[in-house]
Image: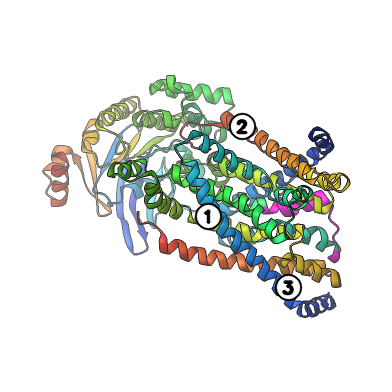
Amino acid sequence: MALIEIRELEKRFNDQRVLAGVNLDVEAGEIKVVMGPSGCGKSTLLRCLNRLVDPTSGTIHFDGQEVTGPMVDVRLLRQKIGFVFQQFALYRHLSVLDNVTLGLRKLQKLRKPDAEEKAMAQLERLGMAAHKDKFPAQISGGQKQRVALARALAMDPAMIVLDEPTSALDPVMCREVGELIRQLNSEGVTMLCVTHDIDLAQAISEKAVFLNQGVVSAEATFAALANHDHEATRTFFNRTKA
Amino acid sequence: MDMLGILQHLAGGVVYTVLVTLVCSLTGLAVGLSVATIRRLSGAPLRTVCDVYTYLLRGVPVLVLLFIVYFGLPGIGLKVPPLLAMALSLGLISSAYLAEIFRGALDSVDPVEVLAAQAMGMTRFQIFWHIEMPQMLRFSLPGMVNEFTSVLKYSPFAYTVGIPEITKEAITLTATTLQGAEIYLVVGILYFSIYRILLVGVRALERYFRVPGIASL
Amino acid sequence: MVNGWMAFSRDLQEQLPLVLNGLIETLNLTVAISISGLLLGVVVFYLSTCRSALIRQVTKGYISFFIGMPLIVLLFLIYYGLPQWGVRMSPFTVAFIGFTLNVAAYNAAYLTTAFNGMDATELEAAHAQGFSDGQVFRYITLPQVLRLSVPALTNQVIGNLKDSSVAFLIQYTEFFARVQELAATNFQFFKAYLFAALVYLAIVSLIVVIARMIEKRICIIG
């Protein structure tokens, strides 16, 4: 059974059907890339996973458990899904180290030395140990995204969800973050990445899921997507390639 | 009497001026923080109550509220001691101004950081306590300093309810020596000095809590 | 309680002319010091942008001292102190001078804050075009700075109205002084002061409404 199983997921905002019956699986250990034009519902899909947005209908099973019902412990669910944002979303009043330890101390109730040890291990892993005492304003965008990844990983999540992780970065940093995501996945971290950056997508995966007008319209290799029967899919992958 | 003699006479009042200022500032801070917190964390009805509170208290002169509390309330059976009367007038009025300062500062907190904390699994209160409030306090520092100095400058009203602070001592001294000009000049210098010392203290505090990338002062 | 209210409203009606007269005095003082405080504030602000370091230093000292000194002490100094040196003035004159000095310091500080936020290249451009210092101040700096400061300046007017109640402490028979007299006739202090608070609140609300209208009309696009 897949780690995440999304079935007929639907989300309406007023009259608008942002998600119109999405079906998607994410296997443990895999990296899944979801692409699509802006407004296709990519971000909403991610936010349904950890219930930042409540879906209108459909089901999501996470590790075999239904997560859309009212009886679900949403906060516990959220602790199991690491979320990385486009705008980094580091807490700017906290140092790099404190950004990573906050969740460990306040949510996992770790003692400060234990939390710091765990946080430092992740910062080492992402090459940010030397910057542990700096504040978000003092590091570059690429470094911020590394800290955001460390912050997510430190919580020992079952998977990491990335929402346009490179769209606020310059090309060099994009590549850097792409390599990092690939490396983490090769170390066994399950990831679901939403992006419209084809370079990033191809750097981290051979395949992509195409989300268009609220439904998954294709899932295939990039070459297959670029020659897809479905016109919108073909256009999207040829345009973004050029 | 020379300036030094006047200064010696008034020195006793300094303690009360500082006491009144501290009591009213702390009242303002505690209530102002509570109002800002309630306003941020609760639904529409309570939020409206908070807005009405700040609007009313910012629309009433300090002296008028002080007189309501100290001279008015006994008429309906509530006798209020002088220092408490100051806290319930000057202190509460400053709480309304501080609540407004905090409200503005909370608007400067990046919504994405709040979302990130939510995505991490924090409760609404944890988000407020660990993310919003620490940033809010840093953003509000200049406004808070203004408000505390404002409290200091309204503290002379305490003489009208019989607290022996600097101004009260000055009035008494003027009555016996008839040297009003020198006395009030010394009083002015005294307040100005307390104000400057307060500023130095706040600057030190600000340096201690300063975080790169969060502007204040 | 009901008797109390009836006694209060009866006395209020009896003394209404006096109370209204006091209210007019309050508004008189508020309007006068708001205008004089703004004018002097602009002068102080102008001097603070002056090329002479000495003048800048002096104006900085002026602003700092009057912001750091309680208004009431300034009023007492002029009202109870100066007669000792032969300078005697009416309560209104004392209040007018004291408030003006104080309010001008605040207004100058607001204008300075706005000035610091201004685009420096605009001023350079104006100088480069050949405008004199005085012309740059009149045509570029002041109009912008005044507009940017409208919220702060109107808050100051509200502050002036509320602070004008202090003037009764130097025997100026403004609104609050009249309310005191009213309270003294029937000992309904609570009701009298509450009444005063409501009147202040009403006028403050009126100023807020007018200020919003002004802000809407003169806001700079962009």
The quadrant of the picture occupied by the N terminus of chain A is top left
- Residue C63 seen: yes
Q: Main secondary structure of the magenta part?
A: helix
Write the start and end of the magenta stretch as one range: B75-93
Q: CA distance from mark 1 to mark 3?
A: 30 Å
* Residue assigned mark 1: C39
Seen from the viewer's position, the closer of residues A40 and B113 is: B113
Whether residues under marks 2 and 1 lie with C-beta atoms below 8 angstroms apart, the answer is no
The quadrant of the picture occupied by the C terminus of chain A is top left
Label 1: chain?
C
Q: Are marks 2 and 1 on the same chain?
A: no
Packing grade of label 3 (10 A; few <14, some 14-19, many >=20) is many
Q: CA distance from mark 2 to mark 1?
A: 36 Å
Residue drawn at (37%, 52%) of the image:
C139
* Residue assigned mark 3: C19
Label 2: chain?
B
